[in-house]
Amino acid sequence: MVFRHAWIFPVLSTLCAFIAFFVCYGIGVARGTHYAWLPYISDGGAVPPQSCIFALFLNLHAVFMAVTVYLRHHQYTAFYSGYFNFTVHWRRFSIVAMIPGFAVSVGFLLVGNFPEGNVTQLWHAIGANLTFLNGVFYACCQIVLAYKLKPWMTPLWLNHTRTGFIAGASIAVIIHIVCANAHPFVPKGAPKLEVPDNGIGLYKPGDPRYLNHIVVTCSEWILAIFFEVMFGSLAWELRDFNLEVKVTRKDEFRSEISDPKTTSLKVDASSTNVLVESNRQWSDGEVAVADGQP
């Protein structure tokens, strides 16, 4: 079975994230559970009914993201299968880069299913840190691969644009971590804010912690939006690739391996359930060959 719209997975991933972020934000403001300027993203998923929407779409987001991360690796192996510069070291680098990508998906699952609050705050915080740190790291790995491997699979203007977004996201995550933990904008001796059980702290102008809160939340929103835009842009390259799902019997696969006439390419293609096939055709008539190896 060949699926010719592999680009849809990063688009759906980003779309689900933005629905979770902005729809739940709007519902929370309308219901008065948090102020319009400016709550944490997770404040929109702290109380029902918006918490249900938040969890649902972040779960979908995590699934589509994991699929995209896996396809991205096989996209490299398919595109560069005929080039000697895609050495075993770069192949391993691409495999290792999938680890933070999958960690981001796990982080989103934890953030969506363990909302803010006194009972689930620990798991929520673990998920948020997995998401923020691994998201920036995964994006940086993709930028390195995009620049170092030639011929470029991604146009330079898109690489430069992604680099700008991830540079902004990297600055935002540093500001977020520093201000959320060190509280540099909170005056000394400021009273501690009592946070209710739902985990939503309400800060008003004039509150001694208001400025620090705004810096933390602004950096969080910038980080999330920049990363999601970068991740959604992976659909650009996937337009040129098909997704082929192949199901084989175990005994058939064993017979292919034991057959001395079976070529290595055939064994490789049979050893995986998912192949990424390139549609891109080159000026000299060369076509990128699908490669099923991890």
Image (cartoon, rainbow, N blue to C red):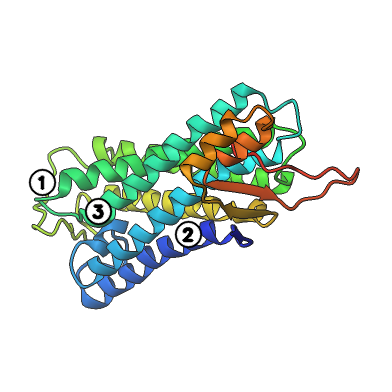
Check disc 2 and report the residue beneath it: 14
| Amino acid type assigned to the residue bearing label 2 in the image | Thr
Camera-near label (2 vs 3) is 2
Picture quarter containing residue 53? bottom left
- Indicate the secondary structure of the residue bearing disc 2: helix
Mark 3 packing: few (<14 Cα in 10 Å), some, or many (20+)? some
Q: Earlier in the sequence, mark 2 or mark 1?
A: 2
> How many numbered callouts?
3
The quarter of the rendered structure image containing the C terminus is: top right
User: Could you tell which of marks 3 and 1 lies nearer the N-terminus?
Assistant: 1
Name the outermost residue toward the right.
284
Q: Mark 3 points at which residue?
A: 210
Q: Residues within 10 Å of mark 1 (few under 14, many from 20)?
A: few
Vertical position of residue 138 compared to residue 217: above or below = above
Label 2: how many Cα within 10 Å (few below 14, some 14–19, many 20+): many
* Circle nearer the N terminus (2, 3): 2
Q: Where is residue 20 in the image (x, y as percent from the top left)?
A: 36, 64
Residue under the image location 53 percent in, 42 percent down: 252
